[in-house]
Image (spheres, rainbow, N blue to C red):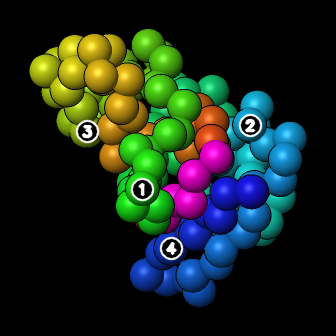
Amino acid sequence: MPLITFSNPDHQTKTVYATAGSHTETLLKLAKANKIPISFDCQDGECGTCLVKVSSLDKKKHRMGGPPTEKERNLLKQLGKLTAEEISQILVDDIPPPWRLACQMIVRDEDILVEY
Ligand code: FES
């Protein structure tokens, strides 16, 4: 089971297990279930309120968060967190970018740090 560590300068760092069925759940759902106060609004990949930075805590694996959908990529680009070049690279390499929308990102089987 992956360990997800949530970190924010104004809140205590908290590490939670993503449960077995969570591979269809978003990072925001996991945060809400564990009372982690990530900001959110639309919950539909349209407002950018839930922007987070994700990094791997598992040196042996590539980051395995589900790749961003076209909708998420477009909003991250609008927010200046993703360039057109990076988008092309994501599509080729299948490696997700560090900036993500918590309401869109699907947690995979890997320990990650989420800065919110
Ligand atoms: S809550 Fe609006 S984009 Fe995630």
- Asked if 4 appears above or below 13 in the picture, the reply is above
- Within 10 angstroms of label 2, few (less than 14), some, or many (20 or more) residues? some
Comes first in the chain, label 3 or label 2: 2
Q: Magenta stretch containing residue 112, yes or no?
A: yes
Which quarter of the figure has residue 12? bottom right
Residue located beneath label 3 in the image: 81
Instruction: Give the number of the disc on residue 23.
Output: 2
Q: Residue 102: x and y, percent?
A: 56, 44
Which of pointers 3 and 1 indicates the residue nearer the eye?
1
Instruction: Give the number of the disc on residue 60.
Output: 1
Question: Quick check: 66 left or right of 106?
Answer: left
Q: Magenta stretch containing residue 42, yes or no?
A: no
Residues in magenta, as a range: 109-114
Comes first in the chain, label 3 or label 4: 4
Comes first in the chain, label 3 or label 1: 1
- Within 10 angstroms of label 4, few (less than 14), some, or many (20 or more) residues? some
Residue located beneath label 4 in the image: 7
Comes first in the chain, label 2 or label 1: 2
Q: Residue 113: x and y, percent?
A: 48, 64
